[in-house]
Image (tube, rainbow, N blue to C red):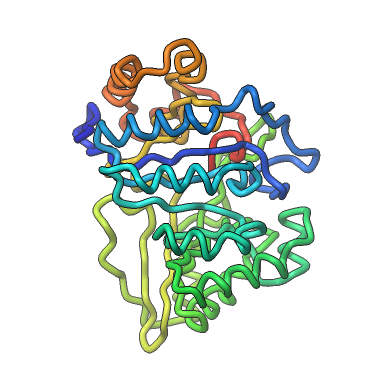
Amino acid sequence: MLTDNHNRVINYLRLSVTDNCNMRCQYCMPAEGVEFSHNKELLSWDEMFLLSSTFIELGITKIRITGGEPFVRKGLMDFLHRLAAVKGQEEISITTNATLIGEHIAALKALGILNINVSMDSLDKDRFNAITRRNYFDVVYNNVLQLLQNGFNVKINCVVMNGLNTDDILPFVEFAHEQNVSVRFLEEMPFNGHSKGFEKIEWDFLKIMDHIQQHFPGTHRMNDGPSSTSENYTIENRRGSFGIIPSFSRTFCGTCNRIRVSAKGELQTCLYTNESVSFKRLLQQNPHPDLIKPLILKAIHNRFKDGFEAEEKNEFKKSMSLIGG
């Protein structure tokens, strides 16, 4: 069991397999995009498998595959087949924009990879295309329905942005009822690839909650998991659920059980801090778990107390695509 210096059990790895993405979402990167890594800069699939297996040996039981957009990288399904066979891992999940997942639904279901988070920030086609700067709404919407029809546990993640998609909050709550699905509203974060972040946000979790309760009385708090990042609710006489993730307010840091590894092999122990270990060169020189484990343990034993302490001591201006969403 992995435990950090604040007695938090670490059992969840968010593994980015690519920083590339086929969208250009406004909250993630500037309109011109960002400079994506060359393939030679990324961990190879073999290196990624060795690293993942090492984390599992140390106590990681849950791995979420992220990006960029994971399905833009060739070889992902072969990697998932290998990873699913590793003893000790209990859950593999994926965060995706759902543009490319359609052709892989049957294979994912066969592997038992049923927990899929879909980044979808509007149910209005024009707003969706404006936010993503791409014309993929119909593909995403239809793939979400396919996932639901095939028995996947789908969670819709909507980043709430003042002046862009606040009109989608209530329709998403209706969508949760219609499709019996979970929708989570995320506070916007300062990882959009611009040189400056922001000091505060207009739509924090309190305002989002108040807005929903004004239109949907009878909300009931659900029993969240011990390390849940979202506050989850049901509404009386309605199916589905909604949650709010205070990603900028950071009210969940005290129970944080997760760490991140970027597609370039950089270990990040907090979303709001810089990389603490780079595995790429080490794996190229001597790909052996015994050389990696001490570095992982050292990083985990030197974690910041919370995202605010990390933010004070680090400067972050990256795109979320480069961090690993």
Question: Is 61 on the left-hand or right-hand side of 271?
Answer: left
Q: Considering depth in this image, is 188 or 39 the residue closer to the camera?
A: 39
Q: Looking at the image, which residue is at 43% across and 19% down?
A: 277
The image shows residue 55, relative to residue 250, as above or below, that is above
The image shows residue 190, relative to residue 126, as above or below, that is above
Measured from the top left, where is residue 170 in percent x and y?
A: 56, 75
Q: Considering depth in this image, is 166 or 64 the residue closer to the camera?
A: 64
Q: Looking at the image, which residue is at 44% across and 52% down?
A: 246
Q: Looking at the image, which residue is at 33% across and 42% down?
A: 86
Q: Hey, which quadrant is residue 322 in on the image?
A: top right
Measured from the top left, where is residue 52 in percent x and y?
A: 39, 34
The image shows residue 261, relative to residue 86, as above or below, that is above
Q: Which quadrant, please, contains the C terminus?
A: top right
Q: Which quadrant, please, contains the N terminus?
A: top left
Q: Considering depth in this image, is 112 or 69 the residue closer to the camera?
A: 112
Measured from the top left, where is residue 209 in percent x and y?
A: 45, 66
Question: Is 161 on the left-hand or right-hand side of 238?
Answer: right
Question: Is 166 on the left-hand or right-hand side of 187?
Answer: right
Q: Looking at the image, which residue is at 57% across and 73% down?
A: 146
The image shows residue 68, relative to residue 183, as above or below, that is above
Q: Considering depth in this image, is 21 or 51 the residue closer to the camera?
A: 51
